[in-house]
Amino acid sequence: MSPEGRRAGLLAAGLLGGSVAVLYAAAAPFVAPALRRVCLPFVPATPAQVDHVLRALRTRSGTMVDIGSGDGRIVIAAAKRGFQASGFELNPWLVWYSRYKAWREGVHHSTSFHISDLWKVSFAQYSNVVIFGVPQMMDQLELKLSNELQSTAKVVACRFPFPNWVPDHTVGEGIDAVWVYDAKVFKTQRRPRTETEDAA
């Protein structure tokens, strides 16, 4: 290969490597784990999942919280339906983006977004709770919500159901399904002890 060809090849490789580095730097804040105790990367809710959450809450009103709110799409959609909606998210880039998006869509007065670890927040003030969790965290979250929520609250789990609670009903099917739980049921339900609790 001629010197000119080698230089062109090195230039192309350098440009490709630089482009990948820039893309990674831009995307990393949005895919970093959102919750400290359990590694939970940001995976946006599908339009069907958003619709199913709203259908699950169609007879409800008042306050709503999305635990691990990502880019804010559930919070914003709920605010448009009349909820006073909040989101808790550990990733600051996603929180700032959510605040901007809420302002752009005209619901910033009925939304709030907080940079916080869910395990350090009390959800006692919320009458409607939405969670996009992973199986590793659901057992611990059952205990937390059972202790904190009022008996009038509803909980909507997306992607994965809670392991011990019995859902009131489900909305949708497959990966877009959501499970709806009634606090007055799960707060009185006997819950199996975990290995951690047994060892204590």
Image: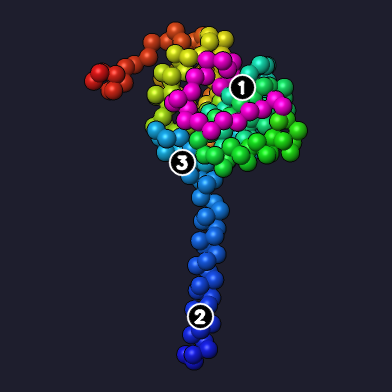
Q: Residue at x 41, y 18 (%)?
A: 143
Quarter of the view holding residue 53: top right
Mark drawn on residue 64: 1
Q: Is residue 125 magenta?
A: yes
Pointer 2 local density, CA inside 10 Å: few below 14, some 14–19, many at least 20: few
Residue that appears at 41% across and 29% down: 137
Disc 2 target residue? 9
> In front: 69, or 29?
29
Q: In the rendered view, tell whether residue 47 sits above or below residue 192.
A: below
Of labels 3 and 1, earlier in sequence is: 3
Mark 1 falls on what kind of element? Answer: strand
* Of the image marks 3 and 2, the number of the one nearer the N terminus: 2
Residue 42 rendering spot, x and y as whole percentages = 52, 41
Considering the numbered disc 3 on the image, is that residue within a helix, a strand or a loop?
Answer: loop
Residue type highlighted by circle 2: Gly
The span picked out in magenta is: 109-129
Residue type marked 3:
Pro
In the drawing, what numbered circle is on residue 33? Answer: 3
Which x, y percent locates residue 154? Answer: 56, 17
Depth order, front residue of 89/147: 89
Q: How is the image coloured?
A: rainbow
Mark 1 crowd level (few <14, some 14–19, many ≥20, 10 Å Cα): many
Q: Is residue 61 visible?
A: yes
Q: Is residue 23 left or right of residue 119?
A: right
Badge 3: residue crowd in 10 Å (few <14, some 14–19, many ≥20): some
- Tell me: 9 left or right of 191: right
Distance Cα–Cα, label 3 vs label 2: 37 Å
